[in-house]
Amino acid sequence: GAMAPGKKITARIKRTLPVKGPQAPTLSELMRWYCLNTNTHGCRRIVVSRGRLRRFIWILLTLSAVGLILWQCAELLMNYYSASVSVTVQFQKLPFPAVTICNINPYKYSSMKDYLSELDKETKKALETFYGFSEGKSKVRRSVDEGNSTGSDFFKQIPLLKFEDFSKTATDLRSGQKRKIEGSVFHKDSSIVNSGDSNDIIGFQLCDANNSSECALYTFSSGVNAIQEWYKLHYMNIMAQIPLETKEKLSYSADDLLLTCFFDGLSCDKRHFTRFHHPLHGNCYTFNSGENGTILSTSTGGSEYGLQVVLYIDEADYNPFLVTSTGAKIIVHDQNEYPFIEDIGTEIETAAATSIGMHFTRSRKLSKPYSDCTETGADIPVENLYNKSYSLQICLHSCFQKAMVDSCGCAQYAQPLPAGAEYCNYKKNPNWMYCYYRLHEKFVKEQLGCQQICKDACSFKEWALTTSIAQWPSTVSEDWMLRVLSWDKGQKINKKLNKTDLANLMVFYKDLNERFISENPANTLVILLSNFGGQLGLWMSCSVVCVIEIVEVFFIDSLSIVMRRQWQKAKKWWNDRKRDRSGKPPEAGDLERQGHDNPVCIDEDLPTFNTALRLPLPQDNPLPRTPPPNYSTLRLETAFTEQLPDTLEVGQH
């Protein structure tokens, strides 16, 4: 059926009025609609302002506000992952740390003679050749005859060399002959110091066993450093071939090292110490290691209530080339930590009482995303070679050892063995030293990637140490004290100990204040959202609904309009193509009628009946209009020809 006239008009109004919101045919119209209807006042002022200057000012203000919002919100986001540090100090009974003690000399020199005779003979010969130092000719000659030939070939391969005036000419210590040296030079000292009258430098050359032209030359400005480094290199080769059980017997027993022991005012003995074999320091002994499940604690601060031990150092049995200082090394650590004595040990001198006061601090950092630390080390792709809890030091050493096994085919002697690997020695791995020095150089320059992979631990315990030293024993008490200690040691009464063989050590808490440093998130999600809301409200009078509106209009609606326009273009192109083929003329219906072209409906108010009446009529089919009312028919014809007398009177009054 035919549509009723009223419905036709409504349909026509709908078809020709400006289209609102997402149905807008163009992006400019969508933006105009958004600016007029949004709650952000700045956008509305841009559209409704009269005059170019005022509109420009509003555009400037609105863009500035948007810029400020973006900047402030970016700051808020960056600060979201910041942490505040809190320090708590509490007074309580404290667990006593593990204290590991080592003699600076790892193995008794008298026990090592058989293994080191050849190396010592070479070292003495070098001293005689370069410095004219000799212990008596007959002694050196006899040791040459007696020495077995376990490493003689090896010493020929890596001799000590003396360089004259920084030239490439060197004197070989064995033959005394001069020879030309090729290879890149690495100075192990930070700088080469000219010692006035002599410019001679001592060093050694390491060559690649597979490619003899690939050599590295290691030189030292100090002859002492050169001889020690060269000695250590050969020493590690020898020690790597000796089984662990044998090495433990060659080093110091608890009875050898510990003379007296007191803890918390009570006597203690070797049963309170646990043996721990360190490759570079021999047998070390850990007090309060917690191995039997109990960790000692102390409820009183001060030197009387800590650990007090007297150590027997036995300087006469020291290796003269391996170590040049006398005493003991100690390290204070947690029971689950590995004691890196070679890195962070504290040296204790002989003939002195060393007091070490401790302050205990526990620290806890927040892990990702606040900082780049690790909770347990499980997320780090490096196998922990030490049977202890994760630390940065453990990770770096394990990483280097892994690289050593991969690159050189064997493990470095100073660190634990990875599964299936064995320690490097020149018999099985003739190339290991050149490989090790090259690899270590890369490690120090951070080219191995270990420093990038390894991270700090998030929580750790730290004992800050304060060391003080006094002369011990005093001159007046020296005589009786040394005699009593000699008796305790089981010596004959007439064989008195020397005070330079003894060291007195005290380790104690200065106070029982435990400092706990922890990181806490400075922001929470609620605070972050509140700050965002404050910024949006301050600069744009905007809320969450307004943000959703922006997303809807600027992303969803704008995209749909662009897609619709593309679709219409494609459709028109396709229709034109079909029409060109068939040869039909374009239809009138093809021209789209768009509401925004209607000159009548520029008003943003809702349509009224009057605006509907003023719509232009189509040319082809004029609609019948209701004729306007004829107002002349409403004129009143008087029924009375004459006026009544009483009304006349009233009018006259």
Image (spheres, rainbow, N blue to C red):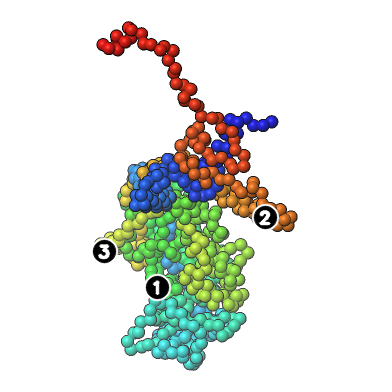
Q: Which residue sits at x=49%, y=41%? A: 600
Which numbered disc covers residue 576? 2
Q: CA distance from mark 1 to mark 3?
A: 26 Å
* Horizontal relation, residue 212 to residue 28: left or right: right
Of labels 3 and 2, the one closer to you: 2
Q: Amino acid at mark 2?
A: Asp
Rendered image: mark on residue 222: none
- Residue placed at 58% from the left, 45% from the top? 593
Mark 3 packing: few (<14 Cα in 10 Å), some, or many (20+)? few
Can you say which quadrant of the picture contains the C terminus? top left
| Circle 2 SS class | helix
Locate residue 44, reporting x and y percent: 41, 44
Mark 1 lies on residue: 324
Q: Nearer the viewer, residue 216 or 324?
A: 216
Q: Position of residue 213 (x, y in %)?
A: 56, 85
Q: Earlier in the sequence, mark 2 or mark 1?
A: 1
